[in-house]
């Protein structure tokens, strides 16, 4: 399944939205993990991590609503959180955390940008309103873009 080709069915759309949910779950779990493992971190980084986790949870919920309208089962956050905890070793310094957060935000932005393009290039009539779907995805993409900018600004102030 590729985001580089037009979305061809409700089933494919649901799977792509679920990929977005997993991406958001990973970002949320990583932000929590970083926050738990870093002891010497300044308030700006803590605020950034908390905001990233809250934003990802909100994005996940919005995507879950869309998936529900397509009558597909969501992936449980607890499953992803356990995978992240078991297979992901958090960086032990602030710079590593910020680079990780930047990579997460950029990955999410690119995914949503590609997904929006694939939906716009599709001539399929989906089981949910296309305009609302695109509005939600564009809002999430804009949040991710803001996240990239926020992390970049924070990184620049630390140099």
Image (cartoon, grey):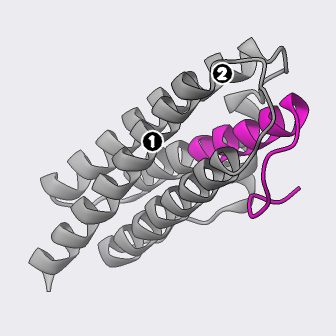
SS at circle 1: helix
SS at circle 2: helix
Q: Nearer the viewer, residue 76 or 153?
A: 153
Give the x, y percent position of residue 24: 57, 43
The crowd level at tag 1 (other Cα within 10 Å; few <14, some 14-19, many 20+) is some
107 in relation to 34, above or below: below
Residue located beneath label 2 in the image: 66
Q: Residue furthest bottom?
A: 159
Residue drawn 30% across the image and 41% down it = 51
Boundaries of the magenta span? 1-26
Q: Earlier in the sequence, mark 1 or mark 2?
A: 2
71 in relation to 78, above or below: above
* Main SS, magenta residues: helix
In the image, which disc is placed on residue 28? none
Q: Nearer the viewer, residue 2 or 62?
A: 2
Q: Quadrant of residue 93?
A: bottom left
Q: Quadrant of residue 50?
A: top left
Check residue 17 for magenta coloring. Answer: yes
Q: Are marks 1 and 2 in contact (CB under 8 Å)?
A: no
Give the x, y percent position of residue 64: 65, 22
Does residue 8 appear to the left or right of 114 in the view shown? right
Does residue 14 appear to the left or right of 104 in the view shown? right
Give the x, y percent position of residue 121: 69, 51
Q: Is residue 40 visible?
A: no
145 in relation to 116, above or below: below
Residue located beneath label 1 in the image: 138
Give the x, y percent position of residue 40: 24, 63
Real-space Cα separation, disc 1 to disc 2, in angstroms: 14 Å
Does residue 147 appear to the left or right of 80 in the view shown? left
Q: Residue furthest front?
A: 123
């Amino acid at each position: 399944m590729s985001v580089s080709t037009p979305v061809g069915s409700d089933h494919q759309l649901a799977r792509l939205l679920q990929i977005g949910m997993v991406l958001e779950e990973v970002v949320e779990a990583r932000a929590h993990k970083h926050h738990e493992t870093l002891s010497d971190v300044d308030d700006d980084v803590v605020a950034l991590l908390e905001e990233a986790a809250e934003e990802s949870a909100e994005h996940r919920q919005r995507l879950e609503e869309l998936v529900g309208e397509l009558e597909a089962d969501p992936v449980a956050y607890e499953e992803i959180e356990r995978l992240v905890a078991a297979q992901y070793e958090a960086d032990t310094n602030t710079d590593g955390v910020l680079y990780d957060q930047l990579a997460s935000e950029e990955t999410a932005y690119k995914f949503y940008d590609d997904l929006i393009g694939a939906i716009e290039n599709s001539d399929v009539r989906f089981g949910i309103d296309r305009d609302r779907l695109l509005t939600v995805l564009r809002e999430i993409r804009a949040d991710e873009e803001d996240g990239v900018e926020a992390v970049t600004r924070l990184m620049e102030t630390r140099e």
